[in-house]
Image (cartoon, grey):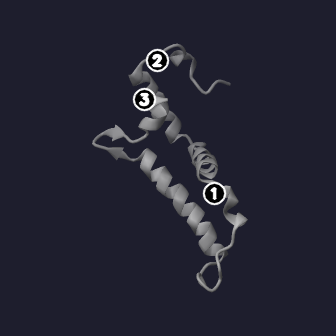
Amino acid sequence: MSCVPRLTRGRLSDPKMLRRQVERMLQHPKASAFVANFTDQWLDLADIDATTPDVKLYPEYDELLKYGMVDETRAYFQSNWSERSGGQPRCRLLVQL
């Protein structure tokens, strides 16, 4: 099954149609998987266990904080590309690709 409905094929070069399709995709439940995968690759979040902060310098660092750091990063990214500013989506990066 194609991610682009049959009616839109060949029309994604139209900026309005492309914007509508991007907005539709961002509302899909799989968008959260995109956020996790994109931020994990872009910011190497999957490698958070590669180093451990010095316990003397950061005594409050624990597993809860570690997971919170990853979740907060994803939530920040999610809010920035899905928020609207003046009626315009901030997901211009995706639209301009």
The amino acid type found where label 3 is placed reads: Arg
Element type at mark 3: helix
For marks 3 and 2, give the one nearer the viewer. 2
The amino acid type found where label 1 is placed reads: Leu
Q: Where is residue 86 in the image (x, y as percent from the top left)?
A: 27, 42
| Closest to the observer, 27 or 93 | 93
Q: Position of residue 73 (x, y in %)?
A: 53, 59
| Closest to the observer, 33 or 63 | 63
| Closest to the observer, 1 or 42 | 42
Taking the view exactly as shown, the residue that stands out farthest to the left is 86
Residue 45: mark: 1
Q: How far apart are marks 3 and 2 (CA)?
A: 10 Å
Q: Which of marks 1 and 3 is nearer the N terminus?
A: 3
The amino acid type found where label 2 is placed reads: Ser
Residue in view at x 59 percent, y 62 percent: 70
Element type at mark 2: loop
| Closest to the observer, 22 or 53 | 53
- Looking at the figure, which quarter contains the N terminus? top right
Residue holding disc 3 = 19
